[in-house]
Image: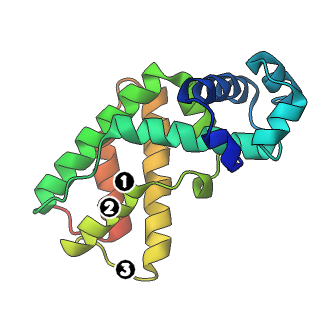
């Protein structure tokens, strides 16, 4: 993550630096993007860049955090569902909001695709899993942490699949896969 000095920059300056970096990482990928080219295009010197970031990986982590925040804003907060039906409706609606955001912001999609799941922490998924647990929809065997990680992987896979197939029904596919993963009885 960026050094604390980065957070003290004016919001517009932070956003401009992250936008340039997001564009580079989306276009060239995490490993092929040039730190020197990013900072040159952002209009900052190498000394200044190292004043805010420990290097390219640190800058990439800042971009992933920014993209994750933007994506979660588009997704909206998780609202506690009182029934299984309400939970599945919220999953479907969230999937559609997320896909609309990623279609409209292809750089966000590309950055997230290049980040590992551990770099994409999602309170939304944690709330979804917690809510599903409280409703008795999840068999926690063999391990809840593993189930949560697999849930995140399934959601990411369905999102990627749906972005490549405009005729897909991601909400229905996601529900089927999560029910199977969680060992939730089918209706």
Q: Is residue 173 above or below residue 98?
A: below
Residue that mark 3 sits on: 140
> Within 10 angstroms of label 3, few (less than 14), some, or many (20 or more) residues?
some
For the question of whether residue 111 can be seen, the reply is yes
- Looking at the image, is mark 2 or mark 3 earlier in the sequence? 2
> Which of labels 1 and 3 is toward the front?
1
Mark 2–mark 1 CB contact (< 8 Å): yes
For the question of whether residue 169 can be seen, the reply is no
The total number of labels drawn is: 3
Residue drawn at x 50%, y 72% is 146
Label 2: which secondary element: helix
Mark 2–mark 3 CB contact (< 8 Å): no
Residue that mark 1 sits on: 124
Mark 1–mark 3 CB contact (< 8 Å): no
Viewer-nearest residue: 107 or 167: 107
Mark 2–mark 3 distance (CA, rounded to whole Å): 15 Å
Rendered location of residue 9, percent (x, y): 63, 33
Viewer-nearest residue: 68 or 100: 68
Rendered location of residue 177, percent (x, y): 36, 55
> Within 10 angstroms of label 2, few (less than 14), some, or many (20 or more) residues?
some
> Within 10 angstroms of label 1, few (less than 14), some, or many (20 or more) residues?
some
Residue that mark 2 sits on: 127
Viewer-nearest residue: 173 or 116: 116
In the picture provided, is 147 more to the left or to the right than 171? right
Residue drawn at x 54%, y 32% is 109
Label 1: which secondary element: helix
- Looking at the image, is mark 1 or mark 3 earlier in the sequence? 1
Residue drawn at x 76%, y 26% is 28
Q: In which quadrant is the C terminus drawn?
A: bottom left
Residue 94: which quarter of the image? top left
């Amino acid at each position: 993550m960026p050094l604390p000095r980065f957070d003290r920059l004016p919001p517009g300056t932070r956003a401009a630096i992250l936008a340039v970096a997001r564009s580079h990482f989306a276009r060239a990928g995490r490993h092929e993007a040039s730190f020197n080219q990013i900072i040159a295009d952002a209009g900052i010197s190498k000394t200044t860049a190292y004043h805010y970031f420990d290097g390219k990986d640190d800058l990439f982590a800042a971009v992933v955090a920014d993209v994750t925040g933007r994506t979660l804003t588009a997704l909206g907060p998780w609202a506690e569902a009182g029934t299984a039906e309400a939970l599945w409706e919220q999953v479907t609606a969230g999937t559609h909001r997320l896909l609309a955001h990623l279609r409209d912001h292809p750089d966000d999609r590309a950055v997230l695709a290049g980040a590992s799941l551990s770099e994409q922490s999602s309170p939304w998924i944690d709330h979804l899993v917690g809510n599903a647990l409280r409703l008795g929809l999840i068999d926690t065997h063999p391990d809840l942490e593993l189930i949560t990680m697999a849930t995140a992987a399934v959601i990411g896979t369905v999102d990627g699949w749906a972005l490549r197939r405009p005729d897909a029904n991601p909400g229905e596919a996601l529900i089927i896969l999560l029910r199977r993963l969680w060992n939730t009885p089918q209706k």
